[in-house]
Amino acid sequence: MKKIHMPRRAALLAGISIASITLGCTAQAQDATAPDQAAASADEGDIVVTGVRASLSSAQSIKRNSDVIVDSIVAEDIGKLPDRNVAEALQRIPGIQVQRQYGEGSSVAIRGLTQVRTELNGRDIFTASGANQLSLEDIPSELLAGIDVYKNPSADLIEDQLSGTINFRTRKPFDFDGFKAAATLTQSHFDLVDKYKPSASLMLSDRWDTSIGEIGILASVSFQKTAFRQDTISTEPFYTLDPANAADAAVLTTLGRTGQTTTLPHGTGIGEVYGDRRRLGTDVSVQWRPSDTLELTAEVFRSDYKFRFDDYSFFAYTSTSAIQPQPGAPFTYSDNGDFQSGTFIDLPVGNNTSAQTRRSKTTDYSLNLKWKPTDRLTVTADGQYVDAKTKNLRSIFGLNGTADTLYQDISGSIPVVNIGSATGLTNPATYNSAFYLDNLNESKASDKTARLDAEYRFDAGILSSIKAGIRFADRKNRTIDTGYRYTDLSGIPTELENVDLSDFFRGDADLFGDIIAFNRGIIRNYQQTLDTLGIAGAPAYVQSGTNEQRQKTYTGYATAFFKTDPVDGNIGVRVVRTDLDVSGYYQQTPIIQNPDGTETNGPTVFNPIAVSRSYTSVLPSLNLRVHLMDNLQLRLAAAKNISRPNFTQLNPSLTITEPGSAQQNQVHTTSGGNPYLKPMKSDNLDASLEWYFSRTGSLTAAAFYKNIKNYIQTAVSTRNVTFGNGNSYDYEVTSYNNVAKGKVKGFELAYQQFFDFLPGPLSGLGMQANFTYVDSQAPSPATSGPVTNVPLELLSKYNYNLVGIYELGGLSARVAYNWRSKYVVTTAGNGTGNLPIFNKSFGQLDASISYNVTPQFALAIDGTNLTNTRRSTYFGIDTRPRDVVVNDRRISLTARITY
């Protein structure tokens, strides 16, 4: 077989590359093969293969020769991943499911689990938000050379990866032979919000031979702006009428349903959200090779992310209070007694205008030294410091009133909503009160890590090499929060505007007409909002909003790599000690009964909470590969792993305010973390069978099983709280706990091929396809409703990707469809009545086409959500809808220059 030489320019024009790759802990940080170099070593011979074929051939070769299972995505060109959004690029990999926020991918689950570790060049990377991960929407994709997804742990990989590790790789100056420059310019249109937004990137790299050795410098910058709009129609939680309750019995009589099971929603609402995102990323790296045995790499990576939205929402909602049907009005029901259509009267109306902003900055400073004192010994030292900050602001103006009637029909795919008022919904007289809520919070986090690794290689025998290392990490996180400040406004402000809802839901919704709401132009400016409403200054940060976490880890590992025909692999153990300190405040505010019969809040009591814990984890691993035939191999792997609770889950702070007399009969709720959470532990078994039937053709099947102890899940529990005045109340506390155990199992199928055997232009056709099945078993924390046992949150049982590829000459095209089955969004969400929320199955179609005008210049157009996917959720069973949502389509035109 002839070797495939892939010139650098050909690699830059390569298409989607989804493969398995093998990298040790040190290799993760600095030795990840550059896309150009990896492609150049794909096979034997001297046939020149370019573009997507070369990418797939290289990907297949890397997967075939790997020691551990790692799927990769390689940028098609400098500054270009297959998808412009990092999370959406990852969804093309078997076993990965993506979560979207306002139409854009924001987080992923690997093989049904969301406990994902994120790394940058093999090191820690995270967003200061109380989570232990990087928010995937923060990173400009143009900065990345590729992304590696590690699915099964080995001893030389950093722990805390229950589902897997996502490693983002940046380019280095020594990846190129000499000077390299690349630039992109993109204009994107978002159709629902009808806005255009630009993006641009620039990379410059060069290397020189000097009197002190070889030196290389690379600088890269990326700027992205996106816009979005999201329209939502919501149905509020369902409650089954209780004939033993006098009020419910009266409602059953009004409906003519006495003696029949009847379940009614308690309202409905709409929301129209406008927003934008801005990403600014920079990466500067310097490499110095003073001799053939010594290499140093220093890098500074910075991500600066801004997110903003403002919205209108309008709803008629009785909360936990009974909802009153209109006597004599027609009602319809499903076979199980769930409401489908009908008219209610005298409902409270809410009309909100709000805004939210987030600014996150993460800066990563790293220094790596690689020394090869002999041909057999490699020593690597690595140091890192991460500085991360996040600021959030939430601002809400609200109007309260009463609707005369509410007609709902939830039997169709788009609910019908008609809210009626005698004075009119655009008349300020419809509203009798106004209020304002604001909340500010900040998180600051840092991480200091140091590690030392050594690998010794043997020339002969079964043992091929031994790798060992130590690592220390010290991560801190501090959050301050004002809590929500409530301001009761006197009178209805005059700064109101009419809101035209004629194009709501792309004009497909049957609504009640226009509304009046607080001015969006004002709510977008926080200080202007305070000035307009006569509020003096922002709220102060309070003790109950302050919490801190510090986590130190001390790690040592050893791994032996072996090879004996027909088996090779590695066996090792990783030992980790974790020291954890968390602190916060328990806040109680009583109600004081005044002599005149009024009620006021009493003095708030703050009780500090501090919890310290330590534990040691021993994590063995074994990876085997059996060469069954020249083109057929079997992989087997077994390992133990842990995933620590994130800092938000550990936050011990809890705020409880005594209910007043008007709230005595309502459900009292609060939420907080659990400082006593244990780390999740997992016993993992993996197997894969891989058949490589041509240079760009493969068919693989993988199976996995995870037995998880101490799985962390959201739960609602009842807690009796006694105040200083002696009064006691039951509160439903939403928090986290370690359920007894969980099991996740499933399999993946993947296929790729270029149909070179077809005649003429059809020879440019190719295809990638994969399918994933994931099943879970875990105790369900759902507390009410018809569904009391649910899968793990955010886990779809089925998902698949179909990608059609065409490449011939300078033309490349791709059509990609991603589908996933229903999944649990949450088991106890805010305002859901403790009912589990399911997301219905859905698919999304994306496409792209590019043409190389010259070897240095290319034009591309790509689009996402081309079929205008409508997403829907429901309360446990599909006769009880929750939300129906539509988002933008995006079309982008890109010009790319590479020298």
Image (cartoon, rainbow, N blue to C red):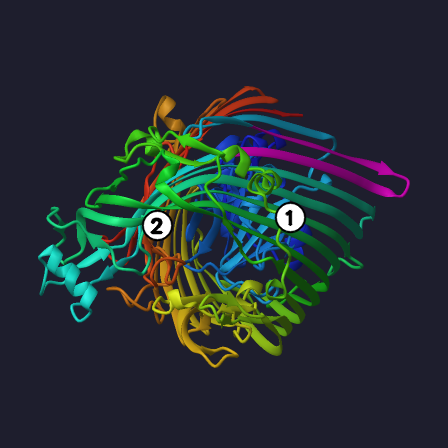
The residue segment tinted magenta is: 198-226
Q: Secondary structure at mark 2?
A: strand
User: What amino acid type should be assigned to the residue bearing mark 2?
Assistant: Asn
Name which quarter of the figure residue 708 lies in. Answer: bottom left
Query: In the figure, 825 relative to 584: above or below?
Result: above
Depth order, front residue of 448/13:
448
State whether residue 451 is above or below residue 295: below
Q: Position of residue 211 (x, y in %)?
A: 91, 40
Whether 542 is drawn above or below 406: the answer is below
Which residue carries the number 2 mark? 799
Residue at screen point 24% across, 55% down: 323
Alpha carbon distance from label 2 to label 1: 49 Å
Magenta-span inclusion, residue 172: no
Secondary structure predominantly adopted by residues drawn in magenta: strand
Q: Residues within 10 Å of mark 1 (few under 14, many from 20)?
A: few
Residue 838 % position (x, y): 32, 55
Mark 2 neighbour class, 10 Å CA radius: few under 14, some 14 to 19, many 20 or more: many
Instruction: Answer whether residue 817 is visible to the viewer in this image.
Output: no
Instruction: Determine which residue is flagged by label 1.
Output: 537
Residue at image position (76%, 48%) is: 297
Residue 287, horizontal then vertical, whole percent:
78, 44
Nearest to the observer: residue 671 or residue 217: 671
